[in-house]
Image (cartoon, helix red, strand yellow):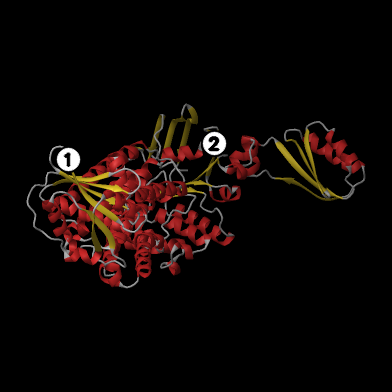
Amino acid sequence: MIIEVENLVKKYSGKIAVDHLNLQVEEGIIYGLLGPNGAGKSTTINCLLGLLKSDEGTIKILGEEMNSNNLKLKANIGVIPQNVAVFEELNVYENIDFFCGLYIKDKEQRKELVNEAIDFVGLTEYKKYVPKKLSGGLLRRLNIACGIAHKPKIVFMDEPTVAVDPQSRNNILEGVLKLKEQGSTIIYTSHYMEEIEQICDKIAIMDSGKIIAEGTTEELKNKITDTEKLVICANGIDDNIIEKLKNIPDVKLIEKDNNCIKVSYKKTQNSTLLAILQVIEEKGIIIDKIYNEVPTLNTVFLELTGKQLRDNM
Amino acid sequence: MFKAYKDWLKIVSRKPMNIFWILFFPIILVTLFKMTMGSAEVVSGFSEKVKLELIKTDNSFIDKQIQSAFDSEELKNYCEFNISDSVESSQEKLEKEEIDGYFYIQKNEDSTYTLVAKTGYNNFANSMIETVSEEFVHTANNIYNTVIEPAIGNSQEIRQGDYTKQGDESFKEENVPSLAAIYTYPAIIYSILFTGLIVQYSIRSMSSNMSYTGMRVELSTDKKSKTFIAAILATFTVGFIALIILTIYIQYVMEVDLGLTTHFGYLMLIYIVGLIVSILLSSMIVMLTNRKDEQVQGNILSAVLMIMYFFSGGMIGNLSLTIKKYAPFLYYINPAALLSDSVNYLSYKKDLSVIWLNLGIIALSGMVYLIVSIFALRRKKNELF
């Protein structure tokens, strides 16, 4: 394990922000950390980075106890904060050189690393540009380059794709996957569930200072879904039919969307599906389209926390 | 360390507003002043002579001594002296603004004498009266102390001391205050003081609880103290270069003598100590307000600096002297007032020991700012996001 957290507790004026949290991150994976606002996600990251002192528990990174004086450990950590953390007065090259210079003293080595980082994020053409001349997407790439130029083993990425165009987002996500291929371990937080699903090997969902679920996307989906959602599209589905469907035992919810209805029912009862189809058939309705809606990570998150991630994080 | 210093030098110097406030704004101020006052010849002298009166005493020796001092050719270029028979008559003229001030000698109970100067509303004339009075303290045999009394309000004692040596020095050109010099000090003090504003950006940029760049600095393997010193040194360098350019501009373009050639060492010392203290003061304010939003923090810092500048007489000529008299504590804790007085002394007064005293107090204040900053730094929390 590259990161091991045991029984981490952090309180603010007696109020618990992180509650006996346990976390293990394997080397070389992309670990997604999700949680609504106030879940304790930021506090956990601050503790992991050594910016905050925990009240209880241990944090081991690369097998060593994390503290702000452990320079060896610090050299292996890179941070890409949500807000672009660069100097407006320095150009692309100078910015990366500044942050890389905080780790690497040798001028030649630094020059090589800075150029590598520039190539990695695709900013070669913009070396001499100052940040205000860069688009939002290019700025995000610069932000990433500043955090990875010194080649850290562990990279903390906090919402690296916020407010960027789709092209830049794809570029960034490809970069994250490339970082993983190069052997880095990435702790990734994002509002975008599809991103998390797309790139994370393992996901932890936090709420009230605890990890309430952890696993791969599939594992998480299996953990929570005892509900199937059947989508039926046909002409002639009226309120009478909907009422009849509602009376079927184990049908939890019916949502109407134009010609389609979404029927949520308890997964375990096979007879429920037959009963639903029977009601439709009895009315002589010809079904245009019928399919099972696969639960998304968003559904998982919603069911576990009862909150919408995008609005509350 | 040198790399960090170079980087911070770029960061600090490339911020246009920094350069505007510490260099271009003071240059605009002094230029506008010169434009207002007309040609350089007028600026270095007076457009109108200061009208002063001397009240005759019943002691012919003292009368002679005073008169001989006022007979100085240099003073006559700037002042017009007349003899008056009574305090009442001069007071009446002062109230009608027919004269700018008057002097009389008062015999004390211990047989020493006090030179009393009554001033009017003309700030420049008041500065001239102050100079003349101080000169008497130095040169006259029997004058024990000097009191300057504004036409309205209470008196303010500007200097006391046992000056008993027989003086035969006459006024020299450098002992006469230049109108231009008086109005260019505030620009210098402004530049020194507002170099501190640059520090806000530097400190915020390297503090993990104030910015994300600071978080990166905090998480790096580099010693934070090294980065801090590099940023402070860079700020100092930019401030110092701006001051030198400003001084050269005032001295050679505006043709106002700030003492660059005669008191180069003193001037540089004042600049260096002033900049260090200004930077330390601003650092302290930034550290103490580290939980505030950048704009709120900037406003607090600007307000503190502006108040200091105001009370140093940057906007009202003799305000610092009034504060010195009635609230000396406020005067001595205001580095801007002490710096302002030091530059002032440098320009036209012979006794430069006051500069050492002022700089000593400023340095002491700097130590206090530093200690408070360190305590504030130790108490800060690092979390940002």
Mark number for residue A39? 2
Q: Chain of mark 2?
A: A
* Residue ID at (13%, 37%): B110
- Dividing the picture into quadrants, the one containing residue B82 is bottom left
Vertical comparison of A199 with A253: above or below: below
Which circle, 1 or 2, is nearer the viewer? 1
**10 Å neighbourhood of mark 1: few (<14), some, or many (≥20)?**
few
Q: Which one is in front, B159 or B111?
A: B111
Q: Position of residue A248 (x, y in %)?
A: 83, 33
* Mark count: 2
Distance in Å between CA atoms under marks 1 and 2: 80 Å
- Dividing the picture into quadrants, the one containing residue A112 is bottom left
In the picture, the quarter occupied by the N terminus of chain B is bottom left
Residue type beneath disc 2: Ala
Q: Position of residue B9 (x, y in %)?
A: 31, 60
Mark number for residue B108? 1
Q: Which one is in front, B124 or A8?
A: B124
Q: Is residue A280 left or right of residue A181?
A: right
Residue type beneath disc 1: Asn
Q: Is residue B234 left or right of residue A267?
A: left
Q: Secondary structure at mark 1?
A: loop
Residue B369, visible in the rendered structure: no
**10 Å neighbourhood of mark 2: few (<14), some, or many (≥20)?**
many
Residue A50, visible in the rendered structure: yes
Q: Chain of mark 1?
A: B
Q: Is residue B115 left or right of residue A203?
A: left
Q: Secondary structure at mark 2?
A: loop
Q: Are marks 1 and 2 on the same chain?
A: no
Q: Position of residue A83 (x, y in %)?
A: 48, 51
